[in-house]
Amino acid sequence: MIDSNTQLYCIIGNPVRHSKSPAIHNAWFQQHHINAVYLAFEIDEVSKGVAALKTLNIQGASITIPFKESLMDHLDWIDDEALNIGAVNTIKIKNGKLLGYNTDHKAAISPLKPFGIKDKKVCIIGAGGAAQAVAYGIYKEKGNIVIINRDKIKGEKLALKYNADFIPMAKIDKLDDFSADIIINTTSIGMYPNVENMAFPSQYIKSHMVVMDIIYNPLKTKLLNLAHIKGCTTIGGLSMFMHQGVAQFKLWTGLTPDIDLMRRAMINGEN
Ligand code: NAP
């Protein structure tokens, strides 16, 4: 029951209406009889969003596009891994202080580990907040990274940090050939409602590749559908989403939530 003691959690981002986080965190709060609600706030200015978190005494927040990096300047404390990654996807508010964490990198890497990452050529498409976490995870597993990004400066900066090669997105389909062992799309290209868009040229997709798309709405992007048809191993964004959400709930409540309940909440709320 919502009453005057109900605690507030939220996700802040823009766009944010596609997010499944409210469905899953609210399902977990109910299951654990915690008097809390989780809402989605689409904001324009990160500084105003952070001020609102403090003013409204919000207990915790998930951070999504495009604020995972810009928000860091507004926090009181940042966990070492999030500092190394350069992106925060989770805030916990304790005694009025905003504490920043990153639950994305372990969540992204875990479904790839069974295929082996060490010494593999791993092509990461994107250089935003999620890409920072994915690149950090791949680097720690000793993969050889290639970054592809639209913005050259951001792409080169990320590549430099992880001793990686960089290819501007505008040039990728003009190469004679391109190959990698693992392809990971970390951009929002192909995300609902623009589901016909693809982040990687189809001509380079070969059956030996593991192709991962961290987008979870739709559950299977056009890139993954095409890779599946070509015989690749494919990994959707649901796995990463579930694991980063579990880690957030643990940080906020100290409880380990039920993954099956989350899966059901997500499938019921699908667009
Ligand atoms: P972000 O920080 O805003 O970064 C967005 C990235 O996408 C940048 O590399 C950007 O390139 C690129 N991009 C966006 N639109 C593009 C376009 N039209 N053409 C070319 N490149 C484009 O966002 P984020 O937080 O990293 O999130 C990115 C995606 O990952 C979102 O779809 C999000 O939902 C998903 N995600 C999923 C999970 C999960 O748990 N499964 C976790 C985190 C994020 P520029 O640098 O050139 O702008």
Image (tube, helix red, strand yellow):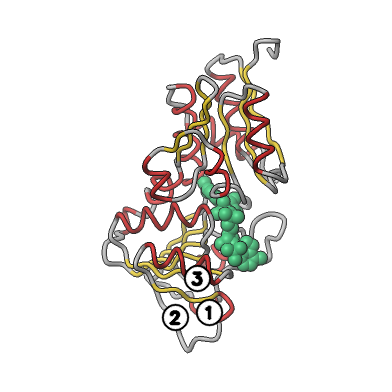
Q: Does mark 1 have its CB less than 8 Å from ligand 1?
A: no
Count of numbered labels shown in the rendering: 3
Q: Is residue 74 above or below residue 162?
A: above
Mark 3 to mark 2: distance in Å? 12 Å
Q: Is residue 219 visible?
A: no
Mark 1–mark 3 CB contact (< 8 Å): yes
Quadrant of the rendered image holding ligand 1: bottom right
Residue 194 appears at what percent x and percent y? Answer: 70, 60
Which residue bears the numbered disc 3?
Answer: 148
Asked if residue 153 lies left or right of residue 207, the reply is right
SS of the residue at dot 3? strand
Residue 41 appears at what percent x and percent y? Answer: 70, 37
Which one is in front in this view, the residue at disc 2 or the one at disc 1?
Answer: 1
In the figure, residue 31 lies in which quadrant?
top right
Asked if residue 123 lies left or right of residue 67, the reply is left
Which residue bears the numbered disc 1?
Answer: 172
Residue 151 appears at what percent x and percent y? Answer: 58, 69
SS of the residue at dot 1? helix
SS of the residue at dot 2? loop
Mark 1 to mark 3: distance in Å? 8 Å
